[in-house]
Image: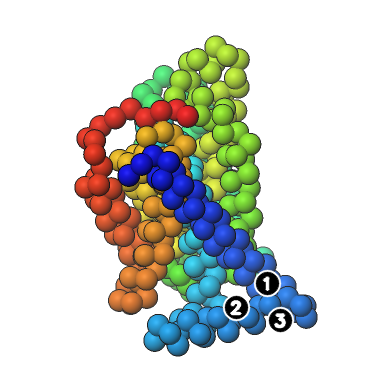
């Protein structure tokens, strides 16, 4: 395919993805403001569209607001996870997503225990976000202040945080009626209205930060030493990247679960690198593969009454295998443009 045609199709795909994300964010906003007259009327149009979709497809899911919230959360994950994951994969930091997912699980455990032992209602997603960010900062600190190999602090944080989570869960077993397995394997029932809205806000922030710091993050990704020589604050940008990773992981954990969350950071990017010829094209293609994985995974899940997280990952792997088959090269260095 001609390069200009490829680029045009990719831009059309990115535009369609942006439009879909805007529609989903619009739904979440109307869901929150539905008690107001105008917002309530617009919100009802979404409900009508859902009932019509159920009629056409012969399903009974799209008329329910919780399904729209789950799909909206998934669409946003399909954008921000590959967006951040592209930098991680090219820096050979793919394992960091799995580490922060286990750290976020410890946050969920702490939130559960706190809710069970106090009268204060604690948002489990917010608790996971706080602990996940603290874990990200901890990994960054260990990496810079210890003489161990680069992946050792990551491995220590991964196993240590999951150990803490399991201990807390075991201690508080029976105190709450929440099924912890939903957080381990992912479930659309975990996506609360507040969690979906938080994911929308965080997604907008992550996209805005990546756009604003694109050149700096690109510089430290491909030549960190040169970035230091150029007096770029490498530590700050490394911290920024790992914190954004924690934010994305916590949001994606709602649907994919702790065990599978790293897949959306890595697999769409791996598929994109098979066909892309530049870093920017890798970004675009990974987001498109991410959307195909999310929407295809939801379709498989709904059609076969299967777990959503596993369905999404299987579709993502299928995209990766198709990208390998379609690739005209086995290995190649990509352009940094």
The reply to whether callout 1 and callout 3 are in contact (CB within 8 Å) is no
The reply to whether callout 1 and callout 2 are in contact (CB within 8 Å) is yes
Label 1: how many Cα within 10 Å (few below 14, some 14–19, many 20+): many
Label 3: how many Cα within 10 Å (few below 14, some 14–19, many 20+): few
- How many angstroms separate mark 2 from mark 3 (CA)? 9 Å
Residue 34 location in percent, x, y?
A: 71, 77
Q: Earlier in the sequence, mark 1 or mark 2?
A: 1
- How many angstroms separate mark 1 from mark 2 (CA)? 9 Å
Residue 46, which numbered label?
2
- How many angstroms separate mark 1 from mark 3 (CA)? 9 Å
State the SS at label 2: helix
Q: On the image, numbered disc 1 is attached to which residue? A: 30
* 116 sits left or right of 166 in the view: right
Q: On the image, numbered disc 3 is attached to which residue? A: 41
Colour option used = rainbow
Quadrant, the N terminus:
top left
């Amino acid at each position: 395919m001609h390069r200009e045609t490829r680029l045009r199709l990719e831009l059309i795909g990115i535009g369609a993805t942006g439009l879909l994300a805007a529609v989903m964010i619009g739904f979440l906003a109307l869901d929150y403001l539905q008690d107001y007259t105008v917002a309530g009327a617009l919100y009802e149009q979404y409900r009508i569209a859902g009932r019509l979709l159920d009629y056409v497809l012969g399903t009974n899911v799209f008329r329910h607001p919780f399904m729209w919230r789950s799909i909206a959360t998934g669409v946003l994950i399909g954008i921000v996870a590959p967006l951040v994951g592209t930098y991680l994969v090219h820096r050979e930091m793919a394992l960091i997503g799995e580490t922060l997912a286990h750290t976020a699980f410890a946050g969920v455990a702490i939130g559960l225990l706190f809710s069970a032992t106090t009268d204060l209602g604690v948002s489990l997603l917010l608790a996971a976000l706080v602990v996940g960010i603290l874990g990200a900062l901890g990994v960054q600190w260990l990496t810079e202040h210890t003489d161990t190999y680069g992946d050792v602090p990551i491995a220590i944080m991964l196993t240590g945080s999951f150990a803490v989570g399991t201990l807390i869960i075991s201690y508080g077993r029976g105190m709450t009626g929440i099924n912890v397995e939903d957080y381990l394997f992912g479930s659309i029932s975990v996506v609360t209205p507040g969690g979906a809205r938080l994911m929308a806000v965080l997604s907008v922030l992550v996209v805005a930060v990546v756009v604003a710091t694109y050149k700096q993050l690109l510089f430290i990704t491909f030549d960190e030493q040169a970035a230091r020589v150029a007096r770029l604050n490498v530590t700050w940008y490394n911290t920024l990247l790992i914190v954004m990773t924690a934010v994305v992981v916590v949001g994606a954990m709602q649907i994919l679960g702790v065990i599978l969350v790293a897949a959306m950071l890595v697999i769409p990017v791996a598929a994109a690198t098979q066909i892309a010829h530049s870093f920017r094209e890798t970004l675009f293609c990974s987001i498109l593969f991410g959307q195909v994985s999310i929407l295809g995974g939801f379709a498989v899940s709904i059609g076969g009454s299967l777990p959503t997280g596993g369905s999404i990952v299987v579709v993502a792997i299928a995209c990766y295998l198709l990208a390998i088959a379609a690739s005209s090269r086995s290995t190649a260095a990509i352009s940094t443009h």
